Image (cartoon, helix red, strand yellow):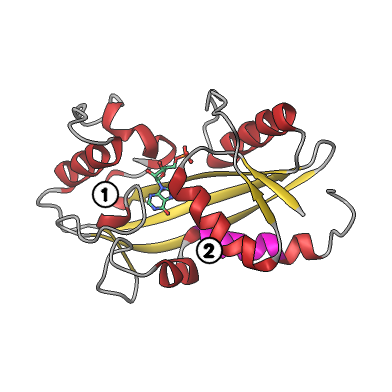
Amino acid sequence: MRILIASTNKGKIEEFRRILEPLGFEVVEPKEKIEVEERGETFLENACLKAKAYFERYGIPTLADDSGLIADAISPYPGIYSSRFYSIDFGGKEEVKTTKDEANIRKLLRLLKGKKERSAKFVVVLFFYGGDRGFFVEGEVRGRISEEPRGEKGFGYDPVFIPEGYDKTFGELTPEEKDRISHRGRAIRKFLEIIKGCEGVFT
Ligand code: IMP
């Protein structure tokens, strides 16, 4: 089965590819980014908007991911603003010196500096849409924010997120370790359970 991923985020696409391709799915990457205005106030609304926009452009059953990090001390931030946290009008803006990911992390660590409460969670909503029908699943992983970035693997906030029960950040774990416990890994496994029972429905 072909599945279009409604994203041009290389980190996300790689995670979908490495879980879905060994199971026989053909993961299709969009040729170009569609500027979907993420006007929703929830991950679910935004995932739904993205799935619909990409399906309408490409006509391939589409899996959209809307995800983010929520740090309890500044909840609900970065939240639905995770990808552009550096630029939003909350806690001062941060200049992009190298990458947006680096600026986002710098802002998060600045806002948590000196705070004892460093607990956080990653959440994701995956919305799968095939034109006249769709469904969604959610995934979550709890952990805490490190004092400093550690590790080169992954993307986004991975270098500062330490999952519960570990002392390494997602940036230090192997891709297989991350997939086993991550919000996205968990949600993809729920997606697989459902799609298994939907043969012929989304082709
Ligand atoms: P979206 O494209 O609006 O869903 O943005 C999601 C943002 O949340 C990403 O750009 C990252 O900053 C962050 N994020 C989501 N999932 C992960 C993850 O698995 N690791 C690190 N950062 C993540």
Residue at (53%, 63%) from the top-left corner? 185
Residue at (72%, 32%) from the top-left corner? 58
Magenta-highlighted stretch: main secondary structure? helix
Q: Secondary structure at mark 1?
A: helix
Q: State which mark lies toward you, 1 or 2.
A: 2
Quick one: 52 or 138, which is closer to the camera?
Answer: 52
Residue at the disc numbered 2: 185
* Residue 99: percent from left, percent from top: 26, 36
| Region in magenta | 184-192
Vertical position of residue 53 compared to residue 77: above or below: above
Q: Is residue 49 left or right of residue 122?
A: right
Total numbered badges shown on the rendered structure? 2
Q: CA distance from mark 1 to mark 2?
A: 25 Å
**Quadrant location, ligand no. 1:** top left
Q: How busy is the neighbourhood of tag 1: few (under 14 within 10 Å), some, or many (20 plus)?
A: some
* Residue 26: percent from left, percent from top: 69, 54
Residue at the disc numbered 1: 73
Q: Amino acid at mark 2?
A: Gly
* Residue 197: percent from left, percent from top: 83, 64
Q: Secondary structure at mark 2?
A: helix
